[in-house]
Image (cartoon, rainbow, N blue to C red):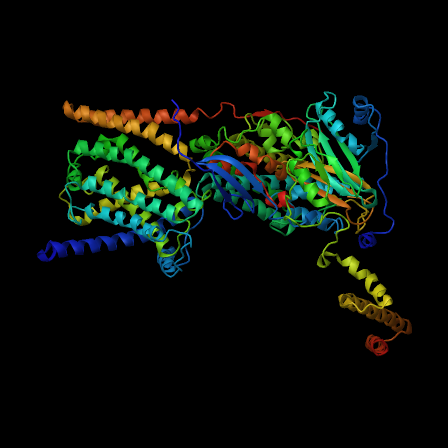
Amino acid sequence: MSAAEERREPGVKETPVVPPPPGSIADTFKKVLPDVEFGASQGVLDVVLTVPRQDIPRVMRAAKDDPRLAFDYLRCLSGIDQMEQGLEVVYNLYSFKHAHNVTIKTVLAADDPQVETVTTVWNGALWHEREAHEMFGIVFQGHPDLGPLLLEEGLGYYPLLKAHPLAEIEESQEDFLRAEAPAAAAAAGAAAPVDERAAKIALAQKKAEVMKKAREEARAKGLSPEDEKAFVQEALKSLEEGG
Amino acid sequence: MTIERELETIDVSFNVGPQHPATHGVFRMVLTVDGELVVDLEPVIGYLHRGAEKLSENCDYRQAIGFQDRTEYLAQFNAEQCYVIAVEKLMGLEVPERAEYIRVILTELNRIASHLMFMGAFSADLGIFGTLFMYAFREREHIQELFEEVSGDRMMYSYFRVGGLAWDVPDDFVERTRVVVQQTRQGIADIDGLLTQNEVLLARSRGIGVMSAEQAIDWGFSGPMLRASGVRHDLRRAEPYSIYDRLEFDIPVGEQGDVYDRYLVRLEEMRQSVRIVEQCLDQMPKDGPIVTAGLKRVLRPPAGEVYMRTENPRGEYGIYLVSKGADKPYRLKIRAPSFCHLSALRNMVIGHYMADAVIILGSVDIVLCEVDR
Amino acid sequence: MIADNPWIDAVVRMLLVVMLVIGVALILIWLERKVAGRIQQRLGPMVVGPYGLLQSVADALKLMTKEDLRPASADRWVFELAPFVAFVPSMLALVSLPFTADLFVRNLDLGLFYIVSVSGLSIVGVLMAGWGSANKYALLGAVRAAAQLISYEIPLVLAILAVAMVAGTLNLGEIVAGQGRVPYIAWQPLGFVIFIIATMAELYRNPFDIPTAESEIVGGPFIEYSGIRWSMFFFAEYINVFMLSVLGSLVFLGGWNWPGGNEVGWPLQLVLIFAKTSALLLTFMWLRVSLPRLRIDQLMSFCWQVLLPFSFLAIIINGLVLVYEWPDVLLGLFSGVIALIAGWVVYRGSRRAVPNQPWTVMPARGIR
């Protein structure tokens, strides 16, 4: 998990919470279910409502059945790994009758990711929940068949969690060129062979730096091009002999 | 008069796929048949799962465009457009006019190409020994040649960028597109003449694989599958994006929700796409910028989430994008229309004959890469 | 009579016919691929030999050198004998098939009856192939094939029987001789139509190729065969096509007799037979590439509910006209009228499904 964090840029921000405009679908929800705690915000395209986990079955059933809401279409069901804050399940709903959208979220604790299934409300959630389960480990209680859909049986881990790393070859260039890991390993005294590649890149970078400095010096001295080349070669040779 | 059967019969269960000419990709159906009647069907997917969502979390926003191509490999521009608009909405960018028009032209041509592929594969399932397949692909070649001139690639274009396009179109783009549109019109007429009134097609597809409107909505259908069931819903009209609110086009809606209606809806959609392309060619500004000014090379959208949906040839293609301010997406969930349609395959097929199972699967027009991602 | 010895005569003639037919099968395979290609806007074989003419030879050589595979759980004798049981009857039927007035092996008095009954034996071969392959796809294909072939034998036989009633004989030579002025297609147009449809079903060609449906059960009963065994099935199919086309042109189109009459020399007779057979062959190939495939229950209902009643009707009408000695022209008249009625019935039945207004369209909207 720390490696994943290191990969991300410093200064990671969280989504700002902008309250939705009055008269939006959030108000209709609050009217239909006054005793449920909704956390409402205006997303980029839809209104986003955050619902506590235990209220999800009631909210979804009301969303479909209540004529003021009439959300008969489950567009998408995604899981998001929010790391310390837990796992999020996001439901995107649409109503054909009223032509309005809403996004409903619920946050599950990372060590107990259970939520009630919505396949009893919309049939279309069948495969979405199955996929969310095999990718994140979210358990949908009451789902008829929560076996693996895209992955093989008995995998033993949940791939889309941030804790599960990508394989080495899939890490992108930027991370390797940062060359932090080999420096840290050398400081710790570990002679890991996996750092060979990073060590080579570090060496190439050092050479490039030396060449650049040597060229600048040569230009400052006003040498002709052949002399400049010879100067740079000398600098490189001294680097190799010295390092 | 009913005859009591005293024979003990066993239901035979066998595999259709994963290697099979009719499954449109690496897809496996475990059919349990009683004679010729399908008693049970279990779809098995995941043969083409490559972890596109996890990989996209480790690419920056520009590299992830390539994954969209490979996820929806028949309507690449549609998938790219959805993703690129999602990032633009997150960043609050305004795309220049010329880029928008070119995007819509290419997207609609890609819709035509995808539906042509459907015509070909559908007729191959029906048993026309490749004739219609060849006609459809002849038209598709014209469109793909145009795409190659524009983007340099016949299939995986990676031409759209956040904020516009990668580079400008060639100088003769408008004339070439008009020629292609003309040829496409002729091709659509050919296909119409061969298939629409064909008695065998009618016998094979009328009343097969029926999904009522309520069932379709419940199972999450979208696109031509939903419209064939009688629901008047097209994302280009209901939630307009890009410049679709300036264009005039009809939306074909079926009545019964069977295989024949789905074929008719897709045929008419091709004609409407031709209409859209012609309007865009007329309205397009002659020159102008093609990328939003002032974009950095490495994009860092502000923290936020967006669920952007566009009308793909297969249905509603959705991208749920979560950004935490970094140069890579935090979560990129792809909502694939074929995924939702396949989950209802069991309901559509049970009770029909085995030969119909193949036709119904063909009418869903799946793309395995977006089912499996 | 060659060498004045009936045995040598028979053997030499049979060898000639066998060589002719193998050559014809090779040419037919090439022709089918070319015709299918041109209708599909492509060229067909072009690489091997000029215009791909040697393609069939190359394919035959390849198939002969392929490894002979047999599934381990296959029933050995059934599996290995099936190609022979499918191939030999096609050759047997050629014994009594005359190509010109003198070019035949034996002109049997029961020639027509013999051909039809012997060609029905190949169904057993297909069934053996499907059962012996120990493969569910093969079994499914074989069951479908058996149902289809047995069902469509009946209209085929009845159509030919109608012509035999008109001709008054089962001897193929005499049937052709009786068509000096008018070919029997004018007396029995309904019979001709039924013959064409039933022939396509007998040979499992589109739109009746459910047993070997490429896109559903991938080759049907022949799925486990490769190499020479598969080529025997393949040859059997093309020899059957050829044989039934020749039969059709002899029985319905006037053979070598019309329009020239019985006295023309054998080159012209050969040309006439060749032309008429080619016309039928090309029709079969053309229909193969342009029509989609019917489902098995639709096939069956078409046979038993449409073809069979109309072929019975044809026979009854023929019987009435012949027994009561009405003028012969009534034969053609009645038959033609019934053919038109049959066509109209089928046309209306299939049009029933086409909606008047195919779809509702949300009207255009959206202006700047």
Rendering coords of residue B81 (x, y %): 69, 42
Front residue of this view, candidates C57 and C71: C71
User: Quick one: quadrant of the C terminus of chain A?
Assistant: bottom right
**What residue do we see at 46% from left, 30% from top?**
B202
Q: Is residue B66 above or below residue A218?
A: above
Is C229 located above or below residue B206 in the figure? Answer: below
User: Which quadrant holds residue B309?
Assistant: top right
Which residue is most to the right?
A221
Q: Left or right: where does residue C184 sit relative to residue A185?
A: left
Q: Is B215 rendered above or below residue C259? A: above
What's the residue at 40%, 32% (across, down)? C298
Q: Does residue C37 appear to the left or right of C103 in the view shown? A: right
| Residue B40 against residue C316 in the figure, above or below | below
List x then y, in percent, for residue A83. Answer: 81, 46
A67 sits to left or right of B136: right
Q: Residue A115 in the image: x percent, y percent?
A: 74, 36
Q: Is residue C27 visible?
A: no
Foreground pick, C73 / B142: C73
Q: Position of residue C91 (x, y in %)?
A: 25, 49
